[in-house]
Every structure is written in C-alpha cells, then in structure tokens.
Image (cartoon, helix red, strand yellow):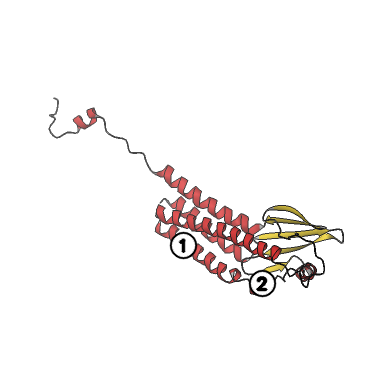
Amino acid sequence: MSKRSRLLTAIGAVLLAALYFVPLWSIQLFAPQYPEGLGMSIRLTTVVGNRPNDLNTINQLNHYIGMKAIEPEGIPELRYFPLVVAALIALGLGAALVGKRGVVIAWLGGLAAFGAAGLVDFWRWSYDYGHNLDFEHAVIKVPGMTYQPPIIGTKQLLNFTASSWPAAGAYIALAAFALGVVALVVQSEAIPPVIPRSAATRDLHSPARGVIA
C-alpha cells in the first residue's frame, strides 16, 4: 500500500479511540410535565443521564409501567464492547503498518460487523426493556401496550415522545470506516495498469530479430 493509504488507515484506527470518551447514541423523552425533556446517552462503557438526575427520573417513571430499572453495571455488553474497540484499533494500526490490502479489508469487515452487532444488541436490549414488563407491580397498566423506544427516529409512548438518534461516537465510527474505504480506493488508483505489449512490440524486442542496418 502507498504511504497515503497507510496514513488514512492509521487515522481511521486512531479515531476509534474517541469512542471511549463520547456517547454513541442518545435517547430523549418529552412530555407535558417534562417540557425540557429527559435524556440518556449510551456510551461504550456505561449509560448516563444527560443531566445528573435524568437517569434516576427515567427509572422512577419506568417503575410505574412495570419496566425494570436501567442499571449499567447489569449490562454485560458494556464490559466487553470496550475490548472489541481496542482490538479494532490494534487491527487498524496493524493494517497501516503491514500495508496489506487484505488486512485493511479485514479491519473494515470487523468494524462493519461491530456496528451491525451494536445495532442488533441495542434493538434486543430495548425490546427486552419495553416488552418484558412487571404488570403485577405496575401502577399504570395499559393492556397490549409496549414501551420499546425506536432505534432511529421518534415514537409516541403514552404521553411521552421518545426520540433516538446516533450521537458523536456513531458518526466518528462511520468516519473511521469511510477513511478505510478511501484508503483502498487511493491504493487502487495508485496501481499502474498492466498494458500488454503488441505483437509488433514483441517482435522488436525478440532476440531472434536481427538489427536493421
């Protein structure tokens, strides 16, 4: 790979380190009694409220409908996802160092798989919280009602409007992936085309051909 392709790959790998410091996804809840909104951010290692009391307030409201509390320490993905990102950073830097096209493709494949797995896991997590309710102890009981927030977009849940959108971390991961793709494109453009010699050219270079005086 060219120096430019290696540099782009290395930058993409280093960008992934930002995932440890910025949120990946954001969920906002708005209702007449909460016009300023309640919010929580999903990070690589934890789930936090956008303001100091937001997560606690959301858990109190969820208790009324029989939803279990959101407790970051009880979510196993928040323990092993950081290890996966560390492996992706190492693989990306290794791809830049080795300079092999196949290693860059493997890194991009791993990054894409991680993103897809994250979205699937987020959907499964939100489904579990929104569907597996404790109706026996719920204060508000609406037959047939579920409270799964959207993965992307806005959804009405009783008197709350829930919005879910990618945060800075998701866009950074996408930028890292894009840099890897650009690195492959740049490398492809740098490879000179193989031009077959014509029969006449081969004849001129043939040892059997004599030199014309």
| Residue 81, percent from left and from top | 56, 67
Circle 1 residues within 10 Å: few <14, some 14–19, many ≥20: many
| Residue 109, percent from left and from top | 48, 55
Q: Quadrant of residue 197?
A: top left
Q: Amino acid at mark 2?
A: Pro
Q: Dot 1 lies on which element?
A: helix
Compared to 106, does 191 lie above or below? above
Say which mark, if any, is on residue 72. 2
Q: Residue at (43%, 42%) from the top-left corner?
A: 189
Circle 2 residues within 10 Å: few <14, some 14–19, many ≥20: some
Q: Residue at (60%, 69%) from the top-left corner?
A: 78
Q: Residue furthest bottom?
A: 73
Q: Nearer the viewer, mark 1 or mark 2?
A: 2
Placement of the C terminus among the 4 image quadrants: top left
Q: Residue at (52%, 51%) from the top-left corner?
A: 179
Q: Is residue 12 left or right of residue 34?
A: left
65 and 113: which one is in front?
A: 65
Q: Is residue 175 left or right of residue 167?
A: left
Is label 1 in contact with label 2 (beta carbons under 8 Å)? no
Compared to 205, does 150 lie above or below? below
Q: Amino acid at mark 1?
A: Leu
